[in-house]
Each structure stands twice: as C-alpha cells, then as structure tokens.
Image (spheres, rainbow, N blue to C red):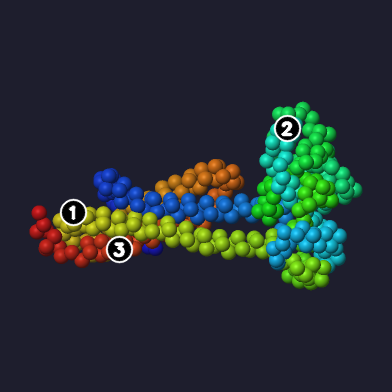
Amino acid sequence: MTPNLYKKTLSHFIEAFTNLAATKLRTVLAMLGILVGTASVVAMVSTGELATQAALEQFKSLGTDMLAVSVFSETASTDSSSSNDFDLSAALGLQTVSSAITTLAPYTMLYVPMSYLGNSIDGTIIGATQNLAPAIKIDMVQGRFISDLDNYSEYCVVGDTIAQKIQPYASKIIGTQIKLGNDFFTIIGVAKNWPENQFFSQDINNSVIVPIKASKLISKYANIDNIVMRLDPNANIETIKTNITQYMSAKVPNKKLYFRSAKELIKSMAAQHKIFTILLGLIGSISLLVGGIGVMNIMLVSVLERRREIGIRLALGAKRHDIQWMFLSEAIVLALSGGIIGIIIGIMCAFIIAEFAHWHFTVFLWPPLVGFTVSALVGIFFGFYPARQAARLDPIETLRTE
C-alpha cells in the first residue's frame, strides 16, 4: 500500500467514525444485529468446545487405553439359571485371549434397598474384584479396597457420597455396618471422591462396592453383565474384540456382546462435535444475516439523506470510487465495532456457562477469529450495494435535491 493510498484509506475511516458518532442512536441500532449475531456464534461455538474439552478431560483422567464389554442374553428368560452360565471363572478367562489385556475387572450391579442405622440410603451396589480399583482408578481415603481373598465375606467399600450420607449418624465409619437388602455388611474402606466418567456407567461416589462373590448373597440376580479392562497403549482393539467374541461364542453362545472403547468414544465425540459446531455456526449466522440486512437498510437511508452532500463532493472533483469508499468504510466500521463488542460478550457468556457447569474455562482463538472475520465480511457484503448506489448518483440530480 502506497503512502497516499494509506492516508486516503485512513481518512475515510476517520470520517466514517465521525459521521457514525453524529447519529449515535441509529449507529447503535445498526450495530445491534451484528453484535447479537457475533456474540451468539462466539458463545455457542466456544461453549461447544468447552463441553467437548470437559468430556475429553474425563477420559484423560481415566485413560484412553480402556475397553468395556457388556453381556446380554439374546433371549429374555425369567429363569435365573439360564442367565448364570457366564460365571466368574469364565469372565476371568478373558484375560487369556490376549496378552495386551493388562487389567481385567468383571463386576455386577444391584439395586436393592440400603439403610444405615435404620436410615434409608439411595445408591447402587457393585460386586467387584480387587482389579476394579486399578482399572478405573479408585483411590482410598480410609481403610482398604475389596480383596479377592474376601470371597463371600460380608465386607464393603462405600463411595464418597454414601460416606457423606452416613457421616451424620456415625463419628467413625470404618468398622460399622450398612444393611444391603437383608444382609449387614461391614464397612472396611471409604473411596476418595471419584470424578464421574462417561466410560464407566456407574457413579462410584454413590455406590457400595462388595466382593463379587458376596454380591450373590444379596441377590440371586447378581449376574456378571459388565467387564472393564485396561489395555496396552499400542494394543489392536479390533483384534482383541474378535478374540473376545470367539471366546464368548465358545463359552456362552447364548450371549450378545456390546463393546465400548475409550478411543472410539473419543473419535465419535470428535465427529459429533464437528457436526454440532457447524449447526451452531449456522444458527448464529442467521442472526448475522439479519444484522447485515440492518446495516444495509441504515446505509441506504444514509445515502438518501446525504444526496446533496454527495452531489457537492462530486461537483468539487471527488471521484466516484471515493464516494463508494466513504460509505463502504462506514459499513465496515459498523460491522467491525459490532463484531468486536459481540466477541467480548460472547466470551463472557461462555465463561458464565462454564462457571455454572463447573468446566475449566479456556479462551479458544478460532471462535473469536471467525466471528471477527465474518463480521468484517458482512460489513463489506451488505455495505457494498449502498456504497455502489451512492457512487452512481448523478451530481446534477443530487444538487437539485432540497
């Protein structure tokens, strides 16, 4: 850009600021559409990014080298013996299908009444082996975790939420008893607050964990329907799935398997996030389109009101492209001003949503950058037609305007 062109462009924008400042109310109304559109795009896209980041953080805390298997009966049956054919020994035998399986933890889930000193408690009962703790990273605050040596012993570990519900009734939780169904289990450990994770279906905080064999004492329907395992980082997940399917077909041919891989879930979430981002961008773009139309209307009114000024400028030697730039610069200033304010408001909205959702807030570069770029393009696109109309006016006709 030559010095003369730079000075001329700068003078156009300075004059645009001066003209817009002279009609404050009209300027604010024209900016409002761009402001709302940009704010909505930035806020929605940033919120989508924050939600995805929060979900990915859950997987990172647990690890991505995870594989879960859910076992279902292909035919419904009320006979409990037909659902028990997948026993603990068969579940533990899955360890032999691949050397890439480093930790394997089958577990049961029960929903029976729980109470402590006669006070009812809501929660889930999980029958587990000692491998569940390293598999999904359960740490202890007090006592110890379930051991495979506990066998049918009526011992249990309570989650953080359950422990808080018990706390008002006992100064010391370890060694006291909680009633699970019709049986009393001695509390031998309290688990540390466990970050909820989409990969593991149950909330450990609101659960009571008992030895997997002892879960049969609580209910005859304590079936091993889920297995979670930790794999080598470089494990071939598809090969492991095939080996598990073959093993299960030989052991329990009447069972159907459903696999969940942490890596595959992350890929699926990433794909959904792209679609989500596009949809949010399109929704926000509608507001920007409305804002752009508002800018065009204001600029057309401005051209109509300033016909005599345009005629005088042309009569004094102004070029038509100077007239065009004069109005186009006003449209760009309107759009950019609305865009910048909209970006600030959009980031603030995303911050408020993150605070309420307890997400870690991060300012992403590309939503504001896209918002700024789009607002500039909207100003150029919707400001070009009024500017072009102003440049095409006949100076003689405009000077006759009263």
Residue type at the position of mark 3: Phe
What element does badge 3 sit on?
helix
Q: Nearer the viewer, residue 253 or 298?
A: 253
What is the spatial separation of the Cα atoms under label 1 and label 2, in whole angstroms?
82 Å
Q: In the image as oriented, which residue stretches furthest toward the front?
A: 79
Q: Is residue 138 visible?
A: no
Viewport quadrant of the N terminus: bottom left
Residue 142 on image: x %, y %: 80, 37
Please give the residue where the numbered disc 1 appears in the rendered image: 305
Residue 292 on image: x %, y %: 33, 58
Please give the residue where the numbered disc 2 appears in the rendered image: 118
What element does badge 1 sit on?
helix
What is the spatial separation of the Cα atoms under label 2 and label 3, in whole angstroms?
77 Å
Which tag is nearer the camera, tag 2 or tag 3? Answer: 2
Q: Residue at x 83, y 34 (%)?
A: 175
Q: Residue at x 54, y 42 (%)?
A: 356
Q: Is residue 158 above or below residue 243?
A: above
* First in sequence: mark 1 vs mark 2: 2
* First in sequence: mark 2 vs mark 3: 2
Please give the residue where the numbered disc 3 appears in the rendered image: 384
Q: Residue at x 72, y 52 (%)?
A: 62
Q: Is residue 29 above or below residue 253?
A: above
